[in-house]
Image (cartoon, coloured by chain):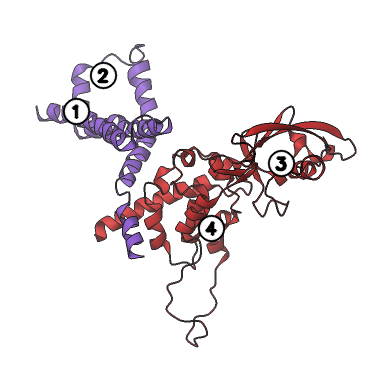
Chain colours: A red, B purple
Amino acid sequence: MSTDQITTKQITTKHISVKRYLPDSSAEPYWQAYDLPVDDSTSLLDALNHIKEELDSTLSYRWSCRMAICGSCGVMVNGIPKLGCKTFLRDYEGEIRIEPLSHFPVQRDLVVDMEIFLEHLAAVKPYLIDDNPVKPYDPQAPETYQQSPEQLARYKQFANCINCGLCYSACPQFGLNPEFLGPAALTLAHRYNLDSRDHGKKQRMAELNRHDGVWSCTFVGFCSKVCPKHVDPAAAVNQGKVEAAKHTLIALFKG
Amino acid sequence: MSISKHATQHKQAFDEPLWWGLFSAGGICFAVFLPAVILFIAVLLPLGLLPAEALSYERASTLLFSVPGFLFVGAVVCLPLFHAAHRLRHGMFDISVGNDALNKKLMYGGAALLSIVALGIVVTGFLR
């Protein structure tokens, strides 16, 4: 729908079904349907807030910024991972089924346990690693790092990740093998490897060049389709394969 | 620290870059050479659209049993075999058939065996 057709004057009723899981009262998840008033500006997050405030205060879900930057409100909408705040009910006809993100253990309703994703993120050391021996406040300390626009452009796209985890729910390989480092972690590793200020590539390559590193990716590409920030993790992971192959060749000759 | 580093080092996938390299090279051969080969050998030739003596026995064997013939077989048989083996291995993992360690040996082993046979025929013909 194009923006000039959007109206907040016309209120209609839509039905959404939410997959509930309340481990205190029932061991099995079940579907619960809600009818709510929506206009063209109603996002899925608005709808969940409406349910929580007006219809059913027992519903649990995560959210914070409502502007696609905190990455908290990821859910499955009709089987596709989406950010609640960036998904508008005007784009859906008929049944709307809301489930917690796939491939993660569910804690309660739409809240999942992202621990394994955070472990994979930490494993690739997603921060600048500087091997400069000079201590802070040392008069010998080098000048502030300078980076040209070209050096910035090399990694900029891969730096837009908000850690929402949608790509992990989209990745069939992560679904089969949770030990797979996965799209976001591999992308962030690649982002720091491409950064001219970083010297940690060698440490990261040891993680990337494992079976559970870049080599578990089969280039399905769905991660890049669902990414709300257009980071293109599939491209990063497959560039990572080239880097891992180079790393292996060099290791082979250096012994 | 040293233990975890050792564990990571231990799990390094030294073979994967090789399989992936062969897969990539095979993919290029599949896309670039095989359509032309199929067009000439499997479509134009049976339809009689090529001159009769273009691939006569004499000419075909001289073409095949030579260094360019060896490279031709490598590009249209061996590399695509490894490409297919890689896809089959990952496809079997996707549908949870067998275990990956065994599938790897079967798939790449099969591709290697068939490649040796194909290249062996060329070399035997070349030496005769």
**Are the numbered discs 4 and 2 placed on the same chain, yes or no?**
no
Instruction: Report whether B76 appears left or right of A48.
Output: left
Give me the chain letter of mark 2: B
Inspect this view and state whether residue B25 appears. Answer: yes
**Looking at the image, is A229 positioned above or below residue A89?**
below
Q: Amino acid at mark 4?
A: Tyr
Q: Which residue is mark 1?
A: B117
Q: Amino acid at mark 2?
A: Leu
The residue tagged with tag 2: helix, strand or loop? loop
Q: Secondary structure at mark 3?
A: loop
The quadrant of the picture occupied by the N terminus of chain B is: bottom left
What distance separates the C-alpha of mark 3 from that of mark 2? 61 Å
Mark sitting earlier along the chain (3/4): 3
Mark 4 burial class by Cα count in 10 Å: few <14, some 14-19, many 20+: many
In front: label 1 or label 3: 3
Total numbered circles? 4
> Mark 4 touching mark 2, by CB under 8 A?
no
The residue labelled by disc 3 is A87
Per the image, the residue denoted by label 4 is: A155
* Contact between labelled residues 4 and 3, with CB atoms less than 8 Å apart: no
Using the image, name the chain to which the residue with label 1 belongs. B
Amino acid found under the numbered disc labelled 1: Val
